[in-house]
Image (cartoon, helix red, strand yellow):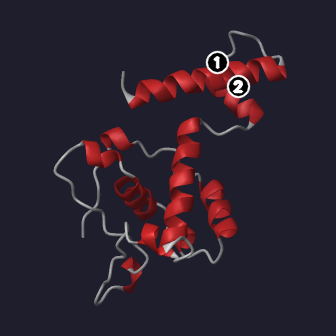
């Protein structure tokens, strides 16, 4: 059983709970249940949690022992890339499940406006407004290198 299967099982339970709480029909599609309740999927919450952590690391709000796990991209000439994180390279697929790898990919995929947010609250608000992370899928994602 893979992690995708785990997420699928948990999301089925989430939708079942929503059907019970809101007294929806048992055969209502999960997408409609989530749309009516305005709940995010667990995958989206997972990605948002990673992004919150990476944002704290990037802006040096987290403890220094955590901040060492990310490397800020240091451009010598192009200022548009100044708020990016270097994606670590790994020799095994197991390490691609790490927060350092997934966090860097998520961080680099959100817009520059989100990355430059002054506070964590405004960062999260920008992420929610732009729906920037809902479509990111780690299983078929190609990382950007510099």
Q: Picture coordinates of residue 141 (x, y %)?
A: 32, 46
Res. 132 visible in picture = no
Q: Residues within 10 Å of mark 2 (few under 14, many from 20)?
A: some
Q: Residues within 10 Å of mark 1 (few under 14, many from 20)?
A: few
Task: Compare residues 100 and 108 and report the one nearer the observer.
Answer: 100
Q: Is residue 24 above or below residue 137?
A: above
- Which residue lies at the image location 23% right of the left edge and 43% below the top edge? 93
**Direction left: furthest residue:** 91
Instruction: Describe residue 122's horizontal placement relative to residue 114 as left or right.
Output: right
Quadrant in the picture for the N terminus: top left
Task: Compare residues 55 and 132 and report the one nearer the observer.
Answer: 55
- Which residue lies at the image location 60% right of the left edge and 74% below the top edge? 117
Quarter of the rendering containing residue 139: top left
Q: Tell me the element at label 2.
A: helix
Res. 94 visible in picture = yes
Task: Compare residues 86 and 60 and report the one nearer the observer.
Answer: 60
The residue wearing badge 1 is: 29
- Which residue lies at the image location 44% right of the left edge and 70% below the top edge? 65
Q: Is residue 47 above or below residue 115?
A: above
- Which residue lies at the image location 37% right of the left edge and 43% below the top edge? 138
Q: Name the disc covering residue 33, or none.
A: 2
Q: Picture coordinates of residue 116 (x, y %)?
A: 55, 76
Gap in Å between the C-alphas at discs 1 and 2? 6 Å
Q: Is residue 34 above or below residue 44?
A: above
Instruction: Describe residue 120's horizontal placement relative to residue 103 as left or right.
Output: right
Q: Picture coordinates of residue 129 (x, y %)?
A: 66, 57
Q: Is residue 21 above or below residue 81?
A: above
Q: Picture coordinates of residue 121 (x, y %)?
A: 69, 66
**Direction bottom: furthest residue:** 77
The answer to whether mark 1 and mark 2 are in CB contact below 8 A is: yes
Quadrant in the picture for the C terminus: bottom left
Count of numbered circles in the view:
2
């Amino acid at each position: 059983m893979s992690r995708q299967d785990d997420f699928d099982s948990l999301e089925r339970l989430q939708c079942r709970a929503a059907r019970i709480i809101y007294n929806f029909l048992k055969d209502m599609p999960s997408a409609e249940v989530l749309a009516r309740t305005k709940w995010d999927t667990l995958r989206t919450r997972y990605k948002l949690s990673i992004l919150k952590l990476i944002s704290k690391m990037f802006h040096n709000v987290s403890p220094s022992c955590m901040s060492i796990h990310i490397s800020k991209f240091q451009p010598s000439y192009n200022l548009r890339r100044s708020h990016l994180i270097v994606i670590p390279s790994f020799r095994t697929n197991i390490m691609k499940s790490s927060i350092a790898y997934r966090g860097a990919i998520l961080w680099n995929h959100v817009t520059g406006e989100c990355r430059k947010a002054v506070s964590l609250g405004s960062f999260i608000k920008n992420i929610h407004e732009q729906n920037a992370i809902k479509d990111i899928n780690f299983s078929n994602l190609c990382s950007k290198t510099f």
